[in-house]
Amino acid sequence: MRELVKRTKEQLTQSIFPPLLVIANFVFEFLAIHPFQDGNGRLSRLLTQLLMLQQGYGFTAYASHESVIESEKIAYYQALNKTQVSRKTDSENLLPRLEFFLGVVRQQGLKAISISTQDQIEVNLSPRQLNIRRLLQSEGQATRKRLSEQSGIPYDTVGQILQKLVKMGKIETRFDERDGLCDDLKKHPETGR
């Protein structure tokens, strides 16, 4: 493992090979080494995500590598088996694994594009944030206090959620004299939500 990590760092730093090929090779070797009794596949997908983010593939933060592989589980194991059978032989063939890996990355990219071009705000919200957004959609406007009471979410946390929704451009705030805070909300004027 130490040798694999060292070689991968060197290859990524020296930029001799495209980063995706280096990452694909790292994952293949990691799975072949199989350093743990259980959980190597899940860990390899997390490490893939980390390495891709470190190399500037920011779209992976919006479209999970894990979810794409889960939807293609049979093809994943077929590609892995085909490459592991010939590993360290004269007829070693990494092409099935590489094609599968690059296909997953492509699907991630397409998912990220889909998310960014549509108003899929719910994909980017936590359950609490989604709860507040839905309350606002049904009420049209509400104070932070009212949202806190209706949702059971602490008042200060509601304030943080509202700030995020304002930054995302999904709601608008108005100053409410009764509360003395900028927390009276209404539907966003452009989207009607």
Image (spheres, rainbow, N blue to C red):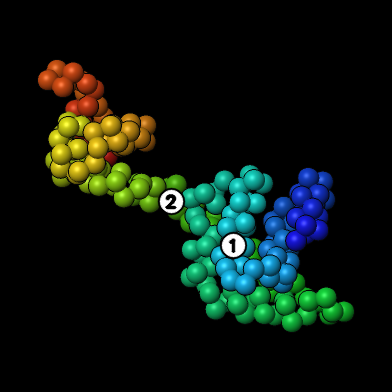
Residue 182 screen position, x and y as percent:
24, 22
Disc 2 crowd rating (10 Å Cα; few below 14, some 14-19, many 20+) is: some
Q: Quadrant of residue 105?
A: bottom right
Q: Which mark is residue 43?
A: 1
Q: Which mark is residue 71?
A: none
Callout 2 secondary element: helix
- The residue at the point 17 percent across, 32 percent down is 145
- Mark 1 or mark 2: which is in front? 1
Residue 107 screen position, x and y as percent:
54, 61
The C terminus is located in which quarter?
Answer: top left
Q: Is residue 145 above or below residue 43?
A: above
**Of marks 1 and 2, which one's residue comes earlier in the chain?**
1
Q: Nearer the viewer, residue 122 or 50?
A: 50
Q: Is residue 82 above or below residue 165?
A: below
Q: Is residue 171 left or right of residue 115?
A: left
Disc 1 crowd rating (10 Å Cα; few below 14, some 14-19, many 20+) is: some
Residue sitting at the far left: 178
Q: Nearer the viewer, residue 84 or 153?
A: 153
- Asked whether the beta carbons under mark 1 and mark 2 sit within 8 Å of each other, the answer is no
Q: Nearer the viewer, residue 98 or 9?
A: 9
Q: Which mark is residue 115?
A: 2
Q: Is residue 22 left or right of residue 142?
A: right
Q: Amino acid at mark 1?
A: Leu
Measure the C-alpha gap from mark 1 to mark 2: 25 Å
Q: Is residue 153 left or right of residue 110?
A: left
- The residue at the point 12 percent across, 20 percent down is 178
Q: Quadrant of residue 135?
A: top left
Residue 141 screen position, x and y as percent:
16, 34
- The residue at the point 24 percent across, 37 percent down is 154
- The residue at the point 60 percent across, 47 percent down is 53
Residue sitting at the far right: 90
Q: Amino acid at mark 2?
A: Ile
